[in-house]
Structure formats: C-alpha cells, structure tokens
Image (cartoon, rainbow, N blue to C red):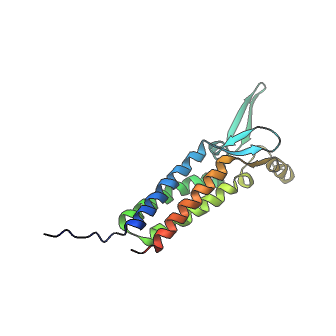
Amino acid sequence: MAKRKSKKNNNSVLLRLIASFLGFATLAVLLLPVIAGEKTEITYTGAQIAFGYAEETFLGSAKIFDFSFMNFLPYLLAIAGTTLAIFAGLKESKLFAFVAGAMFIIQGVLFLLSVKVCVPANITNETLINAFKDGFNLAYGAIIGAIVAFIAGLCSVVSSFVKK
C-alpha cells in the first residue's frame, strides 16, 4: 500500500509556528525596561508601567504609575495572537492566521507608544502629565518587543498567502 501524501502546506504551518513562538516571546517584555529617563538612568519595565508601580523612599511609598490598560493590551494581544496562530496551524485556517498577524502588528505599534500611553500617578494637570512623559524615551525592551511582534505579524500574515 502506498502512503498518502499530506495535504497540509508545510511552509505555512512552519510560518505559523514561528509566528506563535515569536508572539509568545514578546511576553518577555514584561520583564525588560520599556521606558527610560531622558537625562537619568531610571528605567521602568513593562510590568511596572502596565500594572502600576510605587517606589519606596525614606519618606514612605511614592506611587509613580497607575494601571494602564493601553500598556496592558499588548500582552493580551500576545496571548490571543499566539493562541490564534496555533489554531491556524492546526486547523489550516487562513482567517485565524490573518487575524493573529493583525494582532501582532497592533501589539508592535502599542509597544512603540508605551511612553505616550503610560498613566502617571497623582497628576491631574495635562501640562504636568505631558512634561512627565517628555522626560522619558523608549528603552530597548519596547524596541525589541516591537520588532519581534512585527516579525511575528509578518510571518502570520504571509502564511495566509503561501502556496504549495
């Protein structure tokens, strides 16, 4: 008896596997510095600017950041995009792969907007908020996370169009 050839497109499955791995890898940005002080060596990680952060000083606790949904959203998109990329590989779904790719690309854009969407604590004046945000730049964690997310998105979207 002759073996049946698989009808699965190995190139698209490989691209979806790479996209899901890279999408999951962007969760490491939670632990990497995402924003850094412009004139100081202060850095804050993705977890600190997404979930809020308070520093202990000799006078007590000073809250720096409040919870920021827009800084939390890239990590939700990483989990959802990775899940969809895995399902796209298992079910050979071009729609899932395309949507996962869109999620990864949006995630990359949100990483690049980390400074602009952070929520400083206890500041209500818009001028002071802008001055606070102007004192920070993107750190290497946000840049690496954005590049990896864009590559994951590209792999996932391209896998929708790959032919045998």
Q: Quadrant of the N terminus?
A: bottom left
Identified at 40% across, 62% down, the residue is 87
Residue 151 or residue 107, whichever sits in front: 151
Q: Is residue 162 above or below residue 137?
A: below
Residue farthest left in this picture: 1
Q: Position of residue 123 (x, y in %)?
A: 80, 46
Identified at 79% across, 50% down, the residue is 133
Q: Is residue 56 above or below residue 11?
A: above
Q: Is residue 140 left or right of residue 156?
A: right
Q: Is residue 44 left or right of residue 15?
A: right
Q: Position of residue 72 (x, y in %)?
A: 61, 51
Residue farthest front in this picture: 2
Residue 152 in view: yes
Quadrant in which residue 58 is drawn: top right
Residue 53 or residue 151, whichever sits in front: 151
Q: Is residue 38 left or right of residue 35?
A: right
Q: Position of residue 17 (x, y in %)?
A: 43, 58
Residue farthest right in this picture: 127
Residue 100 in view: no
